[in-house]
Amino acid sequence: MDAGPPRLELAQLPTPLHPAARLSAELGVEVWFKRDDLTGLGLGGNKLRPLEYLLADAVGQGCDCLVTGAGPQSNWTMLAALTAIRLGLEPHVVCYGDPAPEWGNLLLHRRLGTMLSWTGDPDRPSVDAGMDEVGARLRGAGRRPYVVPRGGATAVGALGYTRATVELDRQLEAVGLRPETLWLAAGSGGTMAGLILGSARLPTSYTVQGVTVSRPDVAMQVDELARGAAALLGDTDLLGGTDLPGGTDTLGGAGDLPPADVLGGWIGAG
């Protein structure tokens, strides 16, 4: 990818591109998986790619702590806390709901020394106000927090998957594939936004199709993030003023696949 905002090397890249022979036979469609569950740090996962840019931005701004949030078993917050600690930033994580038993990622947070707080509200969006409150409290105490939305969904974070598109393009070329569609889960929208921008910059043979897993308005979020990431790279005119060349379905909407499609699946929510 062309020169752009700074990036730290956190993930073990490239991740493998694997054929799913039995699934392909069952569906009657050739399916491949891009294994971003194997990014190498902690329990792995797709969020390491945006964190490479987000934490570079935090370090560049001279921040001394990171604030983010999600549910108590969020893989995003675990990877954010783990990578922040490696760089000397104190992690603060806001969880929706009330304090929960310490198991899974919540137990790992406790072992890491993550500063945890709870909103007392079971709704996911309550995390957003909670992060603002923690950030304001830290600033009032003379700290320099870097506040990151749920899922790392910012224009800076989306660059992780803009860059990943180049990696995937090289792998597809090496095995002689020209897929028509790349499917992924669309949660906070950052992964999909980066892939759409990357696809437009190359361009690729495929369109990017997200399956909504949490936010009903994720298409608007994806649009905003992709255009923001394009601006960071100086590509403000690349995506034009119309709808982006991708789409989203509700959960389960990926069931009706054209039999001639060749799919490149991406493991991990976006």
Image (cartoon, rainbow, N blue to C red):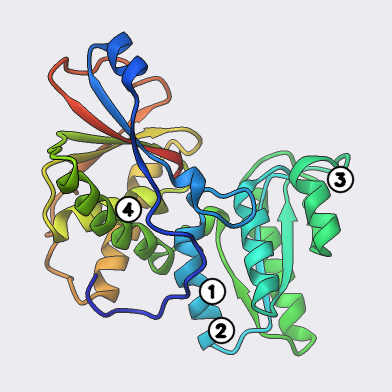
Crowd class of label 3 (few under 14; some 14 to 19; many from 20; radius 10 Å): some
Q: Which residue position holds label 2?
A: 59
Judge depth for marks 3 and 1 and give the one in front: 1
Marked residue nearer the N-terminal end (2 or 4): 2
- Marks 2 and 4 close (CB-CB < 8 Å): no
At a point 16% along the width and 15% down the height, the residue shown is 259
Identify residue type, mark 2.
Val
**Would you name the residue on which mark 1 appears?**
55
Q: CA distance from mark 3 to mark 1?
A: 27 Å
Viewer-closest of 135 and 40 = 40
- SS at circle 3: loop
Q: 229 or 164, which lies in front?
A: 164
Measured in 3D between alpha carbons, the distance from the residue under mark 1 to the one under mark 2, in whole angstroms, is 6 Å
Residue 1 image-quadrant placement: bottom left
Quarter of the image holding residue 202?
bottom left
Disc nearer the start of the sequence (3/2): 2
Regarding residue 186, the answer to whether it shows in the image is: no
User: What residue is disc 3 on?
Assistant: 99
Q: Which residue is mark 4?
A: 193
How far apart, in angstroms, are the residues tagged by discs 4 and 3? 33 Å
The three-letter code of the residue at mark 3 reads Pro
Pointers 4 and 3 in contact (C-beta within 8 Å): no
- Residue 241 picture location, percent across and down: 13, 58
Q: Is residue 108 visible?
A: yes
Quadrant in which the C terminus is drawn = top left
Mark 1 or 4, which is nearer the eye? 1
Instruction: Determine whether label 1 and label 2 are within 8 Å by CB.
Output: yes
Find the distance from the CA under tag 1 to the CA under tag 4: 19 Å
Q: If you read the primary sequence from the N terminus, does the residue marked by circle 1 or circle 4 appear first?
A: 1
Q: Nearer the viewer, residue 111 or 184?
A: 111
Name the residue rendered at 83%, 40% in the picture.
103
